[in-house]
């Protein structure tokens, strides 16, 4: 029997139900970039995302099978007013996090969530859907590229505290 995937808007009560999903993604970030991310309990993560996304319009979604969350996409909407900056006025759906249960990856859930967000963003007349992805996260980067996302800019860092033996001739210091 094939189980149906249901995608719907994420509501405040869902953050508590999706905390394990968020914890799986956060653990990946802590493992790969402990200089940027600290370990946190699932409850702390749920509260963080709930508070981060509390203000303004959101397009966040949850994917469920038999009423159980198997994925979530946390999205905020950001608007640059026309004429107030040197930038063109734009409204952007910003994907803050995409979480799919580890046991359900590779089943099209992330793709379905991202398509749901893109459809809602288009219906609202938003200019784009944008996101950031860490360089170490090849699998999700491949998912985004497969959906048509393109590199808009490169966000780079220089780590001043790198040990001398780890540097090469191109390093600044």
Image (cartoon, rainbow, N blue to C red):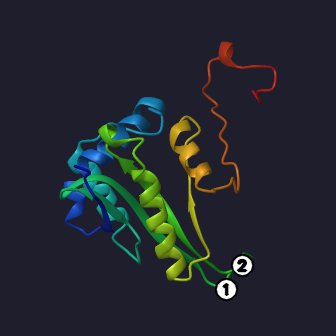
Asked if the residues shown at circle 2 and circle 1 are in contact, with their CB atoms under 8 angstroms apart, the answer is yes
Between residue 111 and residue 16, name the one nearer to us.
Answer: 111
| Residue 137 visible in image | no
Q: Residues within 10 Å of mark 2 (few under 14, many from 20)?
A: few
Query: Does dot 1 land on a helix, a strand or a loop?
Result: loop
Q: For the residues marked 2 and 1, what is the alpha-carbon distance in whole angstroms?
A: 6 Å
Q: Is residue 65 above or below residue 119?
A: above
Between residue 69 and residue 47, name the one nearer to us.
Answer: 69
For marks 2 and 1, the one nearer the N-term is 1
For residue 113, which numbered disc appears in the image?
A: none
Q: Residue at x 26, y 54 (%)?
A: 46
Q: Residues within 10 Å of mark 1 (few under 14, many from 20)?
A: few
| Residue 17 visible in image | yes
Residue linked to disc 1: 82
Residue linked to disc 2: 88
Q: Is residue 103 above or below residue 145?
A: above
Residue 29 position within the rendered picture, expressed as x and y whole percent measured from the top left: 43, 38
Query: Does dot 2 land on a helix, a strand or a loop?
Result: loop
Residue projecting furthest to the top: 165
Is 21 positioned to the left or the right of 135 in the image? Answer: left
């Amino acid at each position: 029997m094939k189980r149906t995937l249901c995608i719907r808007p994420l509501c405040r009560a869902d953050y508590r139900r999706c905390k394990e999903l968020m914890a799986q993604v956060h653990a990946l970030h802590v493992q790969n970039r402990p200089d940027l991310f600290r370990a946190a309990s699932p409850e702390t993560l749920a509260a963080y995302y709930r508070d981060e996304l509390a203000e303004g319009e959101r397009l966040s979604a949850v994917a469920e099978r038999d009423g159980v969350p198997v994925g979530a996409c946390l999205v905020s909407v950001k608007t640059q007013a026309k004429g107030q900056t040197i930038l063109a006025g734009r409204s952007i759906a910003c994907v803050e996090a995409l979480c799919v249960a580890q046991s359900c990856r590779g089943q099209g859930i992330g793709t379905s969530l991202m398509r749901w967000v893109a459809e809602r963003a288009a219906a609202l007349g938003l200019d784009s859907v944008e996101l950031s992805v860490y360089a170490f996260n090849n699998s999700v980067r491949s998912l985004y590229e497969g959906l048509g996302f393109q590199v808009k800019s490169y966000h780079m860092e220089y780590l001043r505290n790198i040990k001398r033996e780890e540097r090469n001739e191109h390093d600044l210091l």
